[in-house]
Amino acid sequence: MGVEENGSVTVPREARPDGPVSDGRARFAALIQEARPSHGRDEELDFDVTMANLGIDSLAIVHLIVRIEDEFDLVFPRSLLLPRVFTSPASLWSALEAVL
């Protein structure tokens, strides 16, 4: 994996999720559920609900970033570290698909 000066990331094929995109999405959804407060984890995840409404605050987002980097063996490009990317699980997944 290489990080360019402009913040873009090249992810080698061996670092990409093993299964189809749906497998990656399921792994991502599990990480979002883990980031939620324990009282909300039993509820079905709605990708369009804001992170705040899921109980995921800024500190939880920082931990989520680390978990996503570990799970998908990648480094978040600087270009994705924008507030709009972390508005909802849907917006975050959409941005991640570009680097997976």
Image: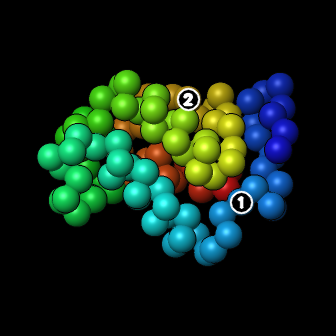
- Where is residue 87? Give x, y as percent: 36, 38
Looking at the rendered image, the quarter that the C terminus falls into is bottom right
Q: Which residue is mark 1?
A: 16
In the image, which is nearer the foreground, mark 2 or mark 1? 1
In the picture as drawn, the residue positioned furthest to the front comes out as 38
Q: Amino acid at mark 2?
A: Leu
Is 64 left, or right, of 78 in this rendering? left
Q: Residue at x 69, y 44 (%)?
A: 74
Q: Secondary structure at mark 1?
A: loop
Question: Can residue 36 be seen in the rendering of this structure?
Answer: yes
In primary-sequence order, the first of circles 2 and 1 is: 1
| Quadrant in the picture for residue 69 | top right
Q: Residue at x 33, y 52 (%)?
A: 33
Whole-angstrom CA distance, mark 2 to mark 1, is: 20 Å
Q: Which mark is residue 81?
A: 2
Looking at the rendered image, the quarter that the N terminus falls into is top right
In this view, 37 is above or below 20? above
Q: Secondary structure at mark 2?
A: loop
Q: Residue at x 36, y 25 (%)?
A: 58
In this view, 94 is above or below 52? below
